[in-house]
Image: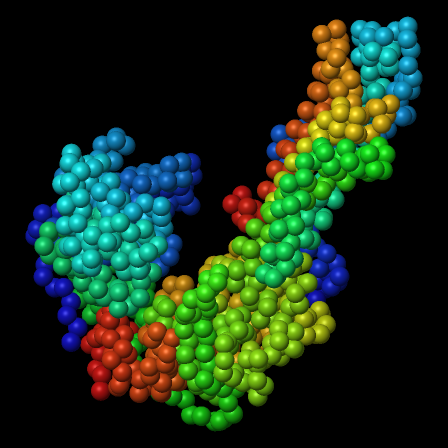
């Protein structure tokens, strides 16, 4: 009976690896978060198409203008249109957030899997990780920028390096717990190769933790970028990012709080939605939690 | 001669009186939400009443309801009455109930390791119970604790007072639990599977300890267990539970001699007999597994000086022939699991040889061993952990054959055949492990092992986590698999009944060494070694033939 309904082998293994839940039912909270995040990402991506002004165009005559029909959120200390800058600034900020999260999770997961499974590699790898953790992110960023000039990539690398050891520790702890499970021993007895056991039996155990950690890194990377921009070690200051808009606005906080308020609001909304969605995704990816619903 | 506790206690004062108790899932109306349905039972002074049933029958819920410990928001009493010494417990406030617990009723749990606080000295834990309920000076309290510890026959009480739970053995921990429960001399003791996690010899000691303390203090005991042997040993009266109902209640001897309910009879029939089965005719003499002089030493570690290691297995030699079952029995720490894991090469033996299907595997590297792994497979004890929870059953089943180059489609077809063999529906392959019961999962685990068409199957306590009726089914399945495919089985168990039922030959292990090795009939009915005799004597209800409701006639 099952011959006709059985998906092809390749298809089956892909489906099995993702183990997507049958129904993607979202509660009200996560649904709002998804919509908000989608709007923020979309508006950042499409910013060049709709913003009324060039975000870098200065105008010495209309500095620190209040909100008006002409300038939706007013202007900053150089007379640049705040609305255009905030919308465009999301592009770099989000890219750094997503990029740093992806890199740290992928690199950290590979190192963590190896470290958790092979006792001999473990001691060496973990000591290297310990020493990496001792490097302050900000100093490393300044050094990297000094070496290679300010760019999005040096910021991403500077944020990723200190995050990797945290991911490695998390993955390693999950693997150390899971490798003692009888189903892993059964897989060894069934003659599965080491890469197969690592990737298909152990890796999926780390996914829930990785989603939560990834969203956290994404959020914290957006904030770290802001700090780096403020110190002048980030992306060059004329390119707007949420970080350097707020950094520059700090001086004028009492004159025009909107500079920090509007940028901060959209940044907080963005980070809140990412974290909420991360938690929801983790719950949905665990087949054991589905049982309780049923 | 089986001696039941026939002295009638029903004329004594009733300590606990449960009448028409029903418990339901909170917020669920209708018959579906009913967890306990019309439970009535009485426990009198000095009497032991057993609640027996399989997992999910509601015996633990009954005890929690009596203790007032039903999980809030999940379960609630929906009808009936619980009275202790004539006082209704259901109308008490939480703080009155708290005072009652410990003072007048106490409970012993199954797993003494998790019921004790791991970061507190055990003496202080007993003292805490006393100080919560009594005004005592520090010195009096300590004296009283040492006194109860002596009453439960703990050796060297002054030292154990200052020990942490992990420094004690399982039996000692359970004694601490009993000491805690009895510190305030309660009138009612609820024992929820108190010996299930213990070895048989320790179990025998704990059971006689409970009986003795009961005798001395006249405590009423509500004893919850799934083990018919234990029931026969300890109880005055028995209540059999199924799906939240009491299906039969009777004095102990009546129940075992003349069970009236169909379910009770079925339960009794599934208790494996201690009479060993006859060794099957040996059609083949081809040895599948030959182990000789195997040793496993766990090194002691130590940074600069090597500490002496632990000999987990020494001088292990035996053979298993095609179509035969060899059982290894022994208590925890006897090294039987080490032997199984060494043969599976999940740990590396220190020395000696292991030949599986004619090939020496003890010294092969992991990589060189991999192609040979299809010849020997394993079934683990815990069916809830031996299947990957994120994989469908089908994917778990075809993993092995696909590793050895069988095409997906062919492996899947073989998996479908396997489902028929282990008597599961074909669509089980598309479902996840959590959708199955423990017994079904164990069948899946067996199917996964048999998918490889192995020559040797190692079953490490494969039925120990299952209910008796499910246990009987799984044992039958193993028998059938063996008959059809002619594989050799190495069966590791602590349960002599199970060993008697399935094994042709038996090895008894103690402290990492083989103390007796022979045919099941020889070893179990005419044991030569003292330790074997000790094990057999400790098996609860050993004089009783449960299936035939009469005394066991041993030759």
For the point 18% across and 47% down, the residue is B145
Residue A173 position within the rendered picture, expressed as x and y whole percent measured from the top left: 56, 50
Is there any visible trace of residue B452 in the rendered image?
A: yes
Query: Which quadrant would the N terminus of chain A be assigned to in this image?
Result: bottom right
For the point 83% across and 20% down, the residue is A85
Seen in the image, is A291 located left or right of residue A68?
A: left
Seen in the image, is B282 located left or right of residue B403?
A: left
How many dots with numbers? Answer: 0
Residue B37 position within the rendered picture, expressed as x and y whole percent measured from the top left: 32, 47
Residue B39 position within the rendered picture, expressed as x and y whole percent measured from the top left: 27, 48
Q: Is residue A99 positioned above or below A20 on the image?
A: above
Residue B307 position within the rendered picture, expressed as x and y whole percent measured from the top left: 42, 66
Viewer-closest of B97 and B333: B333
Q: Is residue A196 positioned above or below B33 on the image?
A: below
Viewer-closest of B517 and B223: B517
Viewer-closest of A74 and B543: A74
Is there any visible trace of residue A210 in the rendered image?
A: no
Q: Quadrant of residue A55?
A: top right
Viewer-closest of B437 and A143: A143
């Amino acid at each position: 009976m099952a011959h006709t309904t059985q998906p092809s082998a390749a298809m089956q293994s892909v489906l099995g690896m993702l183990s997507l839940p049958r129904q993607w039912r979202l509660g009200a909270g996560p649904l709002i978060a998804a919509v908000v995040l989608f709007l923020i990402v979309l508006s950042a991506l499409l910013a060049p198409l709709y913003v009324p002004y060039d975000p870098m165009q200065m105008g010495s005559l209309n500095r620190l203008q209040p909100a008006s029909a002409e300038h939706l959120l007013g202007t900053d200390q150089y007379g640049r249109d705040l609305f255009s800058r905030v919308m465009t600034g999301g592009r770099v900020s989000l890219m750094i957030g997503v990029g740093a999260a992806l890199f740290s999770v992928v690199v950290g997961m590979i190192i963590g899997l190896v470290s958790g499974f092979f006792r001999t590699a473990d001691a060496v790898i973990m000591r290297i990780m310990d020493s990496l953790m001792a490097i302050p992110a900000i100093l490393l960023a300044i050094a990297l920028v000094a070496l290679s000039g300010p760019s999005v990539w040096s910021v991403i690398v500077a944020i990723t390096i200190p995050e990797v050891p945290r991911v490695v520790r998390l993955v390693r702890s999950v693997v150390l717990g899971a490798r003692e499970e009888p189903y892993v021993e059964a897989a060894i007895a069934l003659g599965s190769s080491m890469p197969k056991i690592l990737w298909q039996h152990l890796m999926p155990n780390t996914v829930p933790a990785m989603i939560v950690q990834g969203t956290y890194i994404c959020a914290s990377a957006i904030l770290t970028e802001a700090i780096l921009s403020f110190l002048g070690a980030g992306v060059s200051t004329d390119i707007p990012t949420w970080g350097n808009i707020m950094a520059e606005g700090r001086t004028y906080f009492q004159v025009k709080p909107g500079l920090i308020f509007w940028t901060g609001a959209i940044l907080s909304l963005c980070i809140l939605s990412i974290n909420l969605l991360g938690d929801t995704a983790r719950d949905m990816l665990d087949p054991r939690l589905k049982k309780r619903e049923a | 001669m089986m001696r039941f506790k026939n002295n009638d206690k029903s004329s004594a004062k009733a300590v606990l009186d449960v009448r028409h108790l029903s418990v339901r899932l909170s917020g669920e109306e209708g018959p579906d939400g009913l967890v306990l349905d019309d439970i009535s039972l009485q426990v009198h002074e000095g009497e032991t009443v057993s609640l027996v049933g399989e997992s999910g029958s509601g015996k633990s819920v009954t005890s929690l309801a009596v203790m007032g410990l039903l999980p809030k928001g999940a379960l609630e009493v929906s009808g009936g009455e619980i009275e202790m010494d004539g006082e209704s417990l259901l109308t008490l406030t939480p703080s009155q109930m708290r005072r009652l617990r410990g003072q007048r009723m106490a409970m012993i749990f199954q797993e003494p390791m998790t019921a004790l606080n791991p970061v507190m000295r055990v003496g202080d834990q007993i003292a805490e119970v006393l100080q919560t309920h009594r005004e005592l000076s520090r010195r009096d309290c300590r004296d009283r604790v040492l006194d109860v510890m002596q009453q439960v026959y703990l050796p060297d009480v002054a030292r154990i007072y200052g020990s942490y739970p992990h420094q004690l053995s399982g039996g000692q921990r359970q004694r601490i639990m009993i000491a805690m429960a009895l510190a305030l001399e309660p009138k009612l003791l609820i024992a929820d599977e108190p010996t299930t996690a213990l070895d048989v010899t320790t179990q025998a000691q704990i059971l006689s300890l409970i009986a003795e303390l009961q005798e001395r203090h006249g405590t009423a005991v509500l004893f919850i267990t799934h083990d018919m042997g234990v029931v026969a040993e300890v109880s005055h009266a028995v209540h059999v539970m199924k799906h939240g109902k009491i299906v039969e209640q009777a004095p102990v001897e009546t129940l075992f001699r003349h069970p009236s309910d169909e379910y009770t009879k079925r339960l009794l029939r599934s208790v494996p007999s201690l009479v060993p089965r006859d060794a099957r005719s040996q059609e083949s003499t081809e040895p599948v597994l030959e182990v000789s002089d195997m040793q496993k030493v766990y090194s002691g570690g130590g940074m600069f000086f090597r500490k002496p290691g632990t000999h987990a297995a020494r001088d292990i030699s035996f053979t298993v022939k095609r179509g035969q079952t060899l059982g290894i029995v022994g208590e925890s720490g006897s090294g039987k699991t080490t032997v199984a894991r060494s043969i599976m090469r999940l740990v590396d033996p220190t020395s000696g040889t292991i030949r599986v299907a004619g090939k020496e595997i003890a010294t092969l590297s992991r990589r060189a061993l991999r192609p040979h792994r299809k010849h020997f497979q394993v079934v683990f004890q815990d069916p809830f952990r031996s299947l990957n929870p994120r994989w469908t059953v089908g994917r778990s089943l075809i993993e092995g054959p696909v590793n050895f180059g069988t095409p997906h489609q062919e492996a899947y077809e073989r998996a479908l055949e396997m489902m028929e063999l282990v008597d599961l529906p074909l669509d089980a392959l598309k479902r996840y492990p959590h959708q199955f019961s423990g017994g079904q999962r164990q069948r899946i685990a067996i199917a996964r092992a048999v998918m490889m068409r192995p020559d040797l199957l190692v079953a490490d306590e494969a039925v120990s986590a299952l209910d008796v009726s499910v246990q009987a089914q799984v044992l039958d399945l193993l028998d059938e698999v063996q008959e059809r495919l002619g594989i050799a089985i190495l069966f590791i168990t602590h349960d002599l009944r199970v060993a008697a039922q399935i094994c042709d030959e038996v090895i008894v292990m103690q402290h990492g060494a083989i103390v007796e090795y022979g045919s099941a009939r020889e070893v179990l009915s005419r044991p030569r070694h003292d330790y074997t005799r000790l094990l057999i004597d400790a098996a609860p209800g050993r004089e009783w033939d449960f299936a035939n409701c009469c005394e066991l006639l041993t030759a």
